[in-house]
Amino acid sequence: MSKTIIPEEFQITSEIHQKEYLINGELKKWNGQTTEVYSTISATETYAPTLLGSIPDMGEKEAMEALDAAYKAYNKGQGIWPTMHVRERLECMEAFVEKMKTKRDEVVKLLMWEIGKSLADSQKEFDRTVEYIEDTMEDLKNMDRAAAKFEKHDGVYAHIRRGPLGVVLCLGPYNYPLNETFALLIPAIIMGNTTIFKPAKHGVLLITPLLEAFQSSFPKGVVNIVFGRGRAVAGPIMQTGKVEVLALIGNSKSANALQNQHPKSNRLRLVLGLEAKNPAIILPDADLDLTIDECIAGTLSFNGQRCTALKVIYVHEDIASEFNKRFAERVDALKFGNPWEEGVKLTPLPEPGKPAYIQELIDDAVEKGASVLNEKGGQHMDNYIWPAVLFPVDKSMRVYQEEQFGPVIPVLTFKDIEEPLDDMAESNYGQQVSLFGKDIYAIAPLIDTLVNLVCRVNLNSSCQRGPDVYPFTGRKDSAQATLSVYDALRSFSVRTFVAFKDNELNTATVEQLLEAKLSNFISTDYIL
Ligand code: G3H
């Protein structure tokens, strides 16, 4: 990679030694063991990883403190937060998001250094998260207004709202350490739950600038933030049985390991976004210019480190040679560089071991008969491996079977559309698909089948989660529950209501309750 001078505003001028963690409304000092945080991006002429700082390496004791704080703040449903009026909860969230906005530059810089995300994508991640919080607040107001009424059926009145569930354990992924984590945490908090949040393995320091905002915006114990390894921190918390919701974006192995530790799994609600192997299916009449653009974005945005990335391409045999040639050329024409470089599309991989893993997938595929179609495919740099377009791939190859989550692109051909459909039906994953073609007689029956195999069919478009108002979910090992601005509020709450038989005593009592405005639950006021 060409050594470029790092613009002043993106230089690491001082290390961040993160020594605080948030428990019970207090930013506590950590004096125990720490783990150093390195970026795979080099700041020196001769390649060397950059030391960014360090983070606490916590264990069971701190995990229990965090759980205790969250449990007490919920206080069996009597806590300040779960019983608070929605309007006041919204005020706390408003205060938080305003403080968060002031930290944009710091967080964006750390996103680039910690996970190698391009400047544009890092800014987008931050802005999209702020927008997500603001949309969530608006949606909660809508929900609250819709609930500010009484229904009557068969002589029974009901005032129905959504209530919190209890303690929520939130674990996010390293590829979207801000957005995906907050897409769990924010709706969980705003619905009146109390939370414990542990950042992912990379993208941890970027939470540091936000600790104070969490601490000062919410009542004590509502948000508790701990650092350390999942096994050491999350495991013991689950074993207590005091967690009502496990909210995790990551892989099914971790999800299974954690949920299995809960002593009463019937009580545990799961909100999971897990692995995927989204295919692109390219029909013979597909517009190749557009298809190639979308497949480049789908396979290689953030180096393929997205759960929604296109991870396998099925191209009809009639157009395979043209697609392969043009696609491979486009891959080699992409610009690699540090995240802040102009026009950069491929950026350093945050996991030091990733290039070697991708190389294993390439070697396995080549050994079993695939070729690397692009000249640069598989070239190693200090912190990168150039995306290899592998063809023809078959089901015996690891790159077909595993979620590569990185820069390598398996391509298969098909003659009969039943071939990719059968593979999708057999697959462990069921998140999304991209379908490229124009003939509506071919597309129509395919759409009708594909919607039953995955949860989003992208027509002549790459797979993606956004816009965040749309449902984000999956089948099989890909997800459990649905996330979107609208759905997440529902995933982190339960319908709960006050009912009463229509008689003089009850109507008089409820009228008094409404007039006195003593209950935060029974209310017909509108939040505007
Ligand atoms: O890692 C999975 C993310 O949800 C992908 O989101 O499609 O917006 O990049 P995205």
Image (cartoon, rainbow, N blue to C red):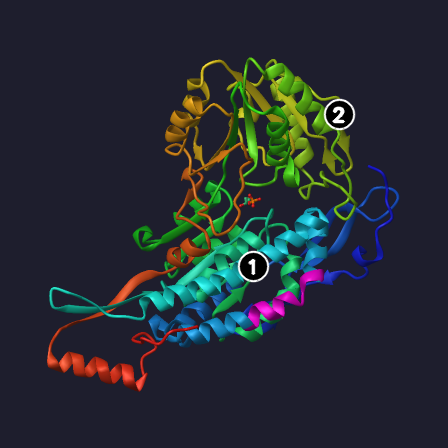
Q: Within the image, what quadrant is residue 3 found in?
A: top right
Q: Amino acid at mark 1?
A: Glu
Residue 171 visible in image: yes
Whether residues under marks 1 and 2 lie with C-beta atoms below 8 angstroms apart, the answer is: no
In percent of width and height, residue 234 lies at 49, 55
Quadrant of the frame with the C terminus:
bottom left
Report if residue 104 lies within the magenta region.
Answer: yes
Location of mark 2 (residue): 376
Residue at 53 percent of width and 20 percent of height: 285
Decide: few, some or many residues near mark 2? Use Cα within 10 Å; few <14, some 14-19, many ≥20: some
The verdict on label 2 being within 8 Å of ligand 1 is no
Residue 26 visible in image: no
Q: Amino acid at mark 2?
A: Lys
Residues drawn in magenta: 95-105
Location of mark 1 (residue): 131
Residue at 55 percent of width and 14 percent of height: 317
Q: Main secondary structure of the magenta part?
A: helix
Of the image marks 1 and 2, the number of the one nearer the N terminus: 1
Question: Looking at this view, is 105 or 149 the one in front?
Answer: 149
Q: Nearer the viewer, mark 1 or mark 2?
A: 1
Residue at 49 percent of width and 75 percent of height: 219
In percent of width and height, residue 410 lies at 59, 24
Report if residue 364 lies within the magenta region.
Answer: no
User: Is 502 located above or below residue 245 in the figure?
Assistant: below
Question: Looking at this view, is 146 or 256 the one in front?
Answer: 146
Q: Quadrant of ligand 1?
A: top right
